[in-house]
Image (spheres, grey):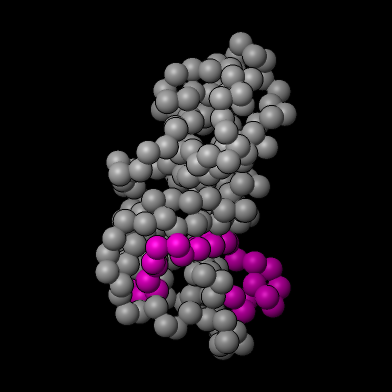
Amino acid sequence: MTDHSQFQFRTVSIHPDLAARLSSLFQRGFRVHARVGCSVTDFLCHQIGIHPDYLKNRIQTIFLNGKAIDSPERSVMSNGSTLALSAAMPGLAGATFRKGGKYAGLRAGITDTLSEARAQTETGLVTVRLFNFIAAELGPLFLKQGIVIRGKDVENTFNNQTVTDDSSRLHFRINDQPVSLQTLIEKLDTQDDILLTLIPE
């Protein structure tokens, strides 16, 4: 479970039905507060709550700081790390970057082999990027934990929302207070960081 207690952000909550509209945001990347100095496996399975079988079988391509990794249990995340997750990609490129794949030797120059030495465990921020159906499946899980984005990301995502002003109060909250979409946009500073979460069902 991610601990946000030491960080002060305005919290924006959205209805779970709106999570599907965030696919482009998930691809661009969002930040998560996490215990760093631990392995990718620890971050995904123990902190975020992804099942080990999902990590093993569903997530086929993992990049840590731009380098493909084959052993998430040994690759260590630090404050400021960027983690990208994808299902199997098509073609030779997909086979090459697939973790533990038989073509892994073709990418020796961009494979992470230096992060096994564990750093001191601390609380930090990591950037996560989710691609293809991994975004649809894991995006809501990250949202339940809370993701850190800029106010402009909320505005860009929902500014063309089709819900009416009255019904949008059922879809958006600021610090747990229901607001219309128009009020949400008016109150957010586009440059401020916010904590985006899901409204509990």
Q: Quadrant of residue 7?
A: top left
Of 35 and 103, the residue lying toward us:
35
Q: Quadrant of residue 21?
A: top right
Q: In this view, does 196 lie above or below 103?
A: above
Q: Where is residue 181 in the image (x, y as percent from the top left)?
A: 61, 22
Q: In this view, does 108 lie above or below 81?
A: below
Name the image quarter holding the C terminus.
Answer: top left
Q: In which quarter of the image is residue 130?
A: bottom right
Please identify the residue farthest to the top as the structure is shown: 166
Of 147 and 62, the residue lying toward us:
147
Residue at image location 48% in from the left, 51% down from the top = 31
**In-image side of 156 versus 148 (left or right):** right
Q: Is residue 171 above or below residue 167?
A: below
Q: Is residue 111 magenta?
A: no
Residue at image location 34% in from the left, 62% down from the top = 36
Residue at image location 72% in from the left, 29% down from the top = 160
Q: Can residue 63 be seen in this view?
A: yes
Q: Position of residue 102 (x, y in %)?
A: 56, 84
Residue at image location 39% in from the left, 78% down from the top = 115
Q: Is residue 50 visible?
A: no
Q: In this view, does 30 lie above or below 63?
A: above
Q: Position of residue 86 (x, y in %)?
A: 57, 61
**In-image side of 14 versus 133 (left or right):** left
Q: Where is residue 61 in the image (x, y as percent from the top left)?
A: 55, 68
- Tell me how many marks there are: 0
Q: Give the range drawn in magenta.
A: 73-98
